[in-house]
Amino acid sequence: MVKTLFILFIFTLSACFTTQASALTLTLSIETVYGDGEKSFETRQESYEAMEDFFSQYNDWQIIDMNKEEITLRTRTEKLSPLLEWSGYAEVQ
């Protein structure tokens, strides 16, 4: 009986000191603007431990809209769009 109470006490004590970090899941709408003017859109979900992790990963991106359900980001690149590359065009270096 004492052994069972001791094990129960240890289990309860460890549960009090164990913090479970819940991951923060964000829905991201990503807009990429290519050098030829074309735009691509992508929606995905990513998980983070804290918002600081999100901001450190996307610190060079422009935040277009941010609410509780979704964050919309924009990035610009000088590369040609995949559609133009698929059509046979290539970048001049």
Image (cartoon, grey):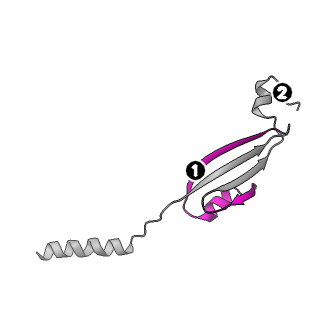
Image location (x, y in percent) of residue 31: 73, 46
Q: CA distance from mark 2 to mark 1?
A: 32 Å
At 76% from the left and 30% from the top, the residue drawn is 83
Front one among 42 and 20: 42
Range of magenta residues: 38-67
Residue projecting furthest to the left: 1
Label 2 secondary element: loop
- The quadrant of the rendering that contains the C terminus is top right
Residue drawn 75% across the image and 57% down it: 64
> Of the numbered discs in the image, which one, if any, rests on residue 55?
none
- Circle 2 residue: 90
Residue 19 picture quarter? bottom left
Residue 70: x %, y % from top left: 63, 56
Q: What's the residue type where badge 2 is placed?
A: Ala
Residue 17 location in percent, x, y?
Answer: 38, 74
21 lies above or below 91: below
* Residue contact between numbered discs 2 and 1, judged by CB atoms under 8 Å: no
Q: Which residue is mark 1?
A: 45
Q: Residue at x 85, y 39 (%)?
A: 37
